[in-house]
Amino acid sequence: DAEITQSPRHKITETGRQVTLACHQTWNHNNMFWYRQDLGHGLRLIHYSYGVQDTNKGEVSDGYSVSRSNTEDLPLTLESAASSQTSVYFCASSEGGIRYNEQFFGPGTRLTVL
Amino acid sequence: AQSVAQPEDQVNVAEGNPLTVKCTYSVSGNPYLFWYVQYPNRGLQFLLKYITGDNLVKGSYGFEAEFNKSQTSFHLKKPSALVSDSALYFCAVRASYNTDKLIFGTGTRLQVFP
């Protein structure tokens, strides 16, 4: 069955370190998204991609970057981790096109920055 | 700008009673609305969506949602709640035309008591 996976599921890191969170989908979806979930804020969009070599900033992109070298993967990199980036991170994908598609979500990565 | 609001942080209901989780929206143009559910330590799961057509949309797990254009609402409903329905529910709206990018509400925690 097609799925979307994230790794690691839990990560503890120190302030200033570079961290990369992996996202891999086997749906063959064009669109991929990264969100962070924080209490009182719901989900906020960090970055998104509509296809290979395409990346776009979301509403909370400062301090994060992504790259899309193939259809299946959209890794999220925290350039220099800050305590404010402690959060739960979710990756999602959708088929794309103008078919008003729902997004499919991964299980999440809980990141703690000390 | 598109937005959704979930006015209740938490909804409590007794098992067997009907439940309603509220969502109001603000959009320019046609609204494309979604409901997702999140169980503890899991990613979001798609429940249902409204694109056009019937104002009553049926989705997964016996849930349905009523689109009301005059009240700009898209409330999630279920005739008879189950304890297993206890979870975090998110309403979302498509960010703009011809995109799968979503804007999420802050979430409503549903607690169903035996």
Image (tube, rainbow, N blue to C red):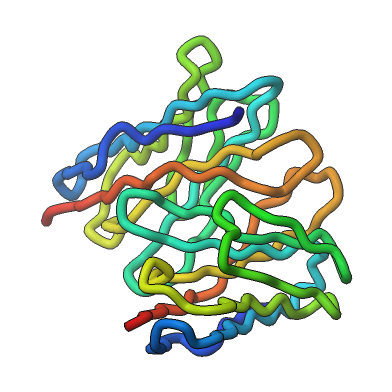
Residue A99 spot, x, y in % from top left: 80, 45
Locate the C terminus of chain A by quadrant: bottom left
Q: Examine the image and state in which quarter residue B7 appears.
A: top left
Question: Which quadrant of the view contains residue A2?
Answer: bottom right
Q: Quadrant of the N terminus of chain A?
A: bottom right
Q: Relative to A99, is A91 on the left or the right?
A: left
Residue B60 pos. (x, y %): 50, 53
Q: Classify residue A29 as left or right of residue B5.
A: right
* Coordinates of residue B82 in the picture (x, y in percent): 26, 54
Above or below, B109 relative to B41? above
Using the image, determine if residue A86 lies above or below residue A17: above
Q: Is residue B8 left or right of residue A112?
A: left
Task: Single out the residue that lies furthest toward the front.
Answer: A16
Residue displayed at 48% across by 33% down: B4
* Residue situated in front as seen by the camera: A105 or A85: A85
Q: Residue B88: horizontal and vertical position, in percent? A: 34, 55
- Name the residue located 26 percent from the left edge and 36 percent from the top edge: B8
What residue is drawn where x is 42% and y is 88%? A11
Outermost top residue: B70
Q: Residue at x 56, y 73 (%)?
A: A106
Residue at the far left: name it. Answer: B114
Q: How many discs mark residues in the rendered view? A: 0
Q: Nearer the viewer, residue B72 or B82?
A: B72
Q: Nearer the viewer, residue A69 or B32?
A: A69
